[in-house]
Amino acid sequence: MPVYNTARYLPVTLDAILAQALKDIEIICVDDGSTDDSLEILKSYAAKDGRIKVYSQENRFAGAARNAGLAEAAGDYCIFWDSDDLFHPEALSRMYSQIIKDEADICVCGGCWYIEDRDWVLPCQGYLNTTRIPESKRPFNREDIPDTILNFSGTSAWNKLYRRGFIVEQGLTFPPYRTYEDVCFSVLSVALAERITVVDEELFYYRRGREGSLIDTISQNPIDPGLCWMDIYSVLSDRGIMPKRSFDNICVSSLSYAIRHYTDFGSMKQLFYYLKETVFPVLWITEQDDDYYYMEWYN
């Protein structure tokens, strides 16, 4: 779990992790150069529960923190949670049971949005869309659903439990972007996995609208989303496993999401021209017949 200036939310998140029904876990927290009380809170929790391991580094963003935590992991399975979210008390136990049962590389679950200023919990189909996966075949992989393999679970890492051996075998790491590092890791992992299973339940609550969240800082590194999708395209093409229709749909969806979160015109303009002049020509993303894209407005 990467931690950066989330002291306000950290105790609630840590309490939710410690309350997990699956008790035989290690909780690796990497403080990414916080300037608030986050590191002190982590140390106080670690002093009370030996399962918590705390590491710290200079501010190098969430991807570097996740890589540092992964390097210290000893468990057979890993999940990458964030320090401001909430979790169902049986999230780990249900996902662990399913991934063991199906001998899978990845287990994906559903989730909700938590709207902080309204204290609302809202369902979100984007984290697990079961209409895009086989009804009768579990586990499954890219060969079973080539048109939707990258689109059934969104681009988040925190709703996926991974077999650590799979991560090591595939050489997966989080890239050094300020934002979108989890997008790159998540999309590549789903594309590369040979066995994917799901738990069709909403097991985590993603906090929306938090001031200072990573997506709110996207204007500081405006072309990160474009770099991310260039990297994904390069890896999938080099490995000969490019699910083109699925890729085009999730790429357009992801980039439009990014554009909606820019807070100044200059940054948005940088991404716009980087996409127009570099990304889309290289990725061969173009206007298509109406049934190619899942939604008409993608065209």
Image (spheres, rainbow, N blue to C red):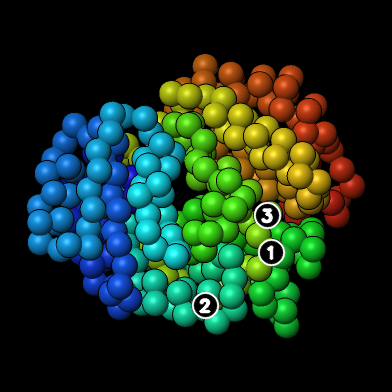
Q: In this view, does 84 lie to the left or right of 283?
A: left
Residue 196 located left or right of residue 163 = right
Q: Is mark 2 on a helix, strand or loop?
A: helix
- Name which of mark 1 and mark 2 comes first in the sequence: 2
In the foreground, 56 or 137? 56
| Above or below, 179 relative to 202 | above
Determine the image quadrant of residue 212: top left
Which residue has dot 3 on it? Answer: 192
In the rendered view, would you say 294 is above or below 68? below
* 137, above or below 2, in the image: below
Instruction: Give coordinates of residue 113: x percent, y percent.
Output: 42, 60
Q: Residue at x 57, y 58 (%)?
A: 166
Q: Residues within 10 Å of mark 3 (few under 14, many from 20)?
A: some
Could you tell whether 254 is left or right of 282 in the image?
A: left
What kind of residue is marked 2?
A: Ile
**Element type at mark 3:** helix
Can the viewer see residue 128? no
Does label 3 or label 2 sit earlier along the sequence?
2
Measure the C-alpha gap from mark 3 to mark 2: 19 Å
Which residue of the protein is positioned furthest toward the right in this rendering?
A: 289
Asked which secondary structure carries label 1, the reply is loop
- Figure disc tally: 3
**Residue denoted by label 1:** 194
| 135 left or right of 121 in image | right
Q: Residue at x 13, y 40 (%)?
A: 37
Looking at the rendered structure, which numbered label has been put on residue 100?
A: 2
Relative image position of residue 167 (x, y in whole percent): 54, 53
124 lies above or below 198: above
Give the residue type at disc 1: Glu
